[in-house]
Image (cartoon, rainbow, N blue to C red):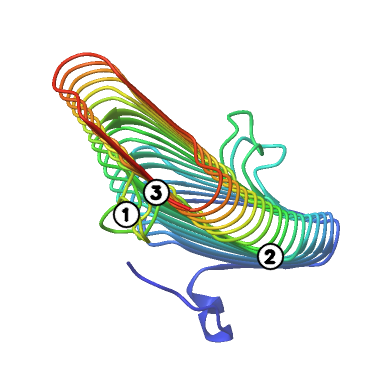
Amino acid sequence: MKKFYFTLGMLFCGTFILSAQTNTSVLTQNGDANSAYSIQSGSQNILDVRQDGATNFTDSRQTGRANDADIDQVGSNQDSYIKQIGRSNEYRTSQVENGNDNLSMVRQEGVENYGGRGNDWGTYQAGSRNFSETYSIGDANGAATIQRGTDNKASILQRGDRNISTYLTSWNWGIQQIGNRNAADIDQIDDDNTASIEQWGDDNAFRITQEGFVNTASSYQYGNRNMAGGSALNWGILQVGNNNRATSSSVGDDNNSGTYQGGDDNTSTIVQTGDGNIANGLSRGGFGTDQRGYYNNSDLVQIGNSNSASTDQQGNRNQADAYQQGAGNRSSVIQERLTNDSDVDQLGNLNGSAVYQFGTSNRSIVFQNGTENTSDVAQTGLTHLSTVTQMGSLNASVVSQQN
């Protein structure tokens, strides 16, 4: 995909707009291979660019306060670049009409800058093989991207505190993708950030990374062969920092998920409904939850067909629940030190389970209902308690306790 760089030598190749504050600039170009360049400085400037055709290009720069950039491109092979520096600036980029191979890149620096506030999105692309990248530096910034079509990619990177990539629009997403073979990536660095991704369709993959304090992430996938992480990405949700919270939900076939939380008041929930569920790399570092420090909690719920699960908690006030309902269920919970707790319920078909708890106030309850049940619980240090109830078919159970 082509890239352009803004220099003075390019001013005569297209339309150029230069303005100071409280100006409104409107530009309409019809046809192919048009270029538009604009620079606005000051406050309350408005830029409105519409390009209709193919292989058009726009480069917009705004500095100051309360500026607004609105770019509409209709057709294929369109490129849009927006850079805003200052406070309370807003942008909207729209690349539609079944436009393919379009590129949208946005960079905002400052505080309280938004893509989508007062509109329904920051970047909206409809078609195939489109790419959107939004980069925010500063505090209390917000971004939202929607893509409809196939083979699209969207990424949002935010550095600073109190940034959001969710609850910004009427649809409550940071990135929403509707279609097949799409990939979404949100990276947030610093404190008190919030992110969400929603994907509808088949063969989609996502990744959320948060580093800092009081971060929150959520995701929702609906369709077949969706993955959290997946071959093109590394994980579903990864959080490093304090006060983490993550949820993931998949509805559909051949699901996969992830989640890793690094430190402090972690909680995680993964819910999968559909066929071929896993919950990702089935941990000791491969994820299918995996929490490593302080007030850990985890819930894994899987309902329907070739289920598998894991939960690996390593320090402090661990608790883990896993609930599986139908077909080839397996589960594994490893908890290591302090107030461990585990509850595994498995109902139908090829059940398994293995719980290993290592130190302090261990407790484990496993309930299994039907077909090829087996269970294995090993508890090592201090106040053990274990209850295993098995009902139909080839039951087996081993519990080993030590002190």
Query: Label for residue 308?
Result: none
* Mark 2 Cα shell of 10 Å, populated few (<14), some (14-19), many (≥20): many
Relative placement, left or right, of 42 versus 295 is right
Tell me the CA gap for discs 3 and 2: 22 Å
Query: Label for residue 258?
Result: 3
Q: Secondary structure at mark 3?
A: loop
Q: What type is the residue that disc 2 sits on?
A: Asp
**Residue holding disc 2:** 190
Q: Position of residue 145 (x, y in %)?
A: 52, 45
* Mark 1 Cα shell of 10 Å, populated few (<14), some (14-19), many (≥20): some
Relative placement, left or right, of 403 versus 149 is right
**Disc with the residue nearer the chain's start (3 vs 2):** 2
Q: What type is the residue that disc 3 sits on?
A: Gly
- Extreme-bottom residue of the structure: 9
Which of these two is toward me, 246 or 342? 342
Which of these two is toward me, 111 or 43? 111
Residue 203 lies in quadrant: top left
Q: Position of residue 105 (x, y in %)?
A: 51, 62
Q: Secondary structure at mark 2?
A: loop
Q: Position of residue 54 (x, y in %)?
A: 35, 53
81 above or below 279? Answer: below
* Pointers 1 and 3 in contact (C-beta within 8 Å): no
Tell me the CA gap for discs 1 and 3: 30 Å
Residue name at image x 69 percent, y 52 percent: 243
Relative placement, left or right, of 376 versus 221 is left
**Residue holding disc 1:** 101
